[in-house]
Amino acid sequence: MPDSRRFLDPRVLNRIDRLELKARLIVEGTVAGLHRSPFRGVSVEFAQHRQYVPGDDLRFLDWKVFARSDRYTIKQFEEETNLAAHIFLDASGSMEFTSASGGDEQITKFNYATWTAAALAHLALGQRDAVGLVLFDEHVRTVVPPAGGKNHYDALIHAIEGAKPSASTNPGKALLESANSIHRRGLVIVISDLLCDADETLRALRLMRARGHDVIVLRILDPAEVHFEFDRMTRFDDMEGPMQLLIDPRAIREAYLKEFKAHDERLMRGCVSDRTDIVRLTTDTPLDVGLTAYLGARLSRMRARA
C-alpha cells in the first residue's frame, strides 16, 4: 500500500477533485496502525459474565476477572448490533471563511469539514456500521438516514458535495430539531466552527448525552480566527449577513482574543463536564495530526473500559 500520509497536507488534499478519494486517503493515513476501530462497540451494552466453554470466541474473555480469580469467564452483551453514527455537518455561511489569499492555498473551513465528514463515514462504513448525515445551518437542511453499504456511501458523498454554505449557524437548534428523530442510541458527531451561542449549543449536546448517545464535537477553525494575526487595515465581511467593516485589526486584537478565549473555554469546560469529546482542528493542520491523536486517545479509553 502506498504511503497515503503524504497526501494529508491540506494543500495537497485541496487539489484532489474526488471527495471519496480524499476520504480514502485520510482514512488510510490516519488509522493505519490502529489495530481496532476507535468507534466499534460503542453501542454494545455489557450484561453479565458466564463461564467459558470450549468453542467460545476468545475475544470476549475477561482477562481482568482471570487475573483476580484464575477463572476463565466470557462477557455477554445485551445487544451486539452495529453502531449507528449520525454526522452533523455545519453548512452555514461562516464555514466558507478562509484567510488564505488565493490559488490552491484557499482552504475553507467547509472544505476541511467535508473531508473530515467523508473520512469518518468511510471509516464507520468500513467496519459495517450504519452512518447518517445531517446538513444544517440555522435549521436542519438535509437528512440522509443511517444505513450501510457502498450505495449508501455514494449517497452520503453526493449530499456532501452538493451542499453550499449559506445563512447563519445554529448547531444547538439543529441538534434539538433532530433529537426526537434519533431513536436508537449511537454516536453523534458534530462538525462545526461553533461560532454561535455557547450555552445553547451545550444544552443541545447535553440533551444528546442524556438520551444515551456518545457525542463527539470536532470544532473546525481557520488559524486567523484563533490567532487574529492581521497587521494592516482590513475589510471584514459578515459571512452570514450584509455587514462590512474596515478596521485596523491592531486596535481590536486584544479585545477579540479575550472574547475568543472566553467563548472557547466555555465550550471546552461545558463539554468536559458533560463527558462530551471536543477536539479543535485548524485548517492548516494535516488531518493525520489531529485525527490520529484524537482517535488514538479514544481507542485507549475504550480499551481501558473493556
Image: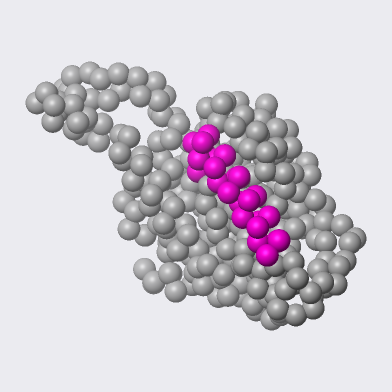
Residue nearest the observer in this picture, 169 or 157: 169
Q: Does residue 114 lie above or below 77 as drawn?
A: below
Image-quadrant location for residue 100: bottom right
Q: Position of residue 71 (x, y in %)?
A: 12, 23
Residue nearest the observer in this picture, 121 or 9: 9
Residue nearest the observer in this picture, 69 or 221: 221
Magenta-colored segment: predominant secondary structure: helix
Quarter of the image that includes the N terminus: bottom left
Q: Does residue 81 lie above or below 37 as drawn?
A: above
Q: Does any portion of residue 85 appear in the rendered image?
A: no
Image-quadrant location for residue 133: top right
Please report the bounds of the magenta region as a residue range.
254-277
**Left or right, residue 213 beside residue 76:** right
Q: Please tell me which residue is depicted at 61% across the width and 75% down the height of the picture.
A: 15
Quarter of the image that includes the C terminus: top left
**Left or right, residue 76 beside residue 62:** right
Q: Please tell me which residue is depicted at 31% across the width and 51% down the height of the picture.
A: 35
Q: Position of residue 89 (x, y in %)?
A: 66, 49
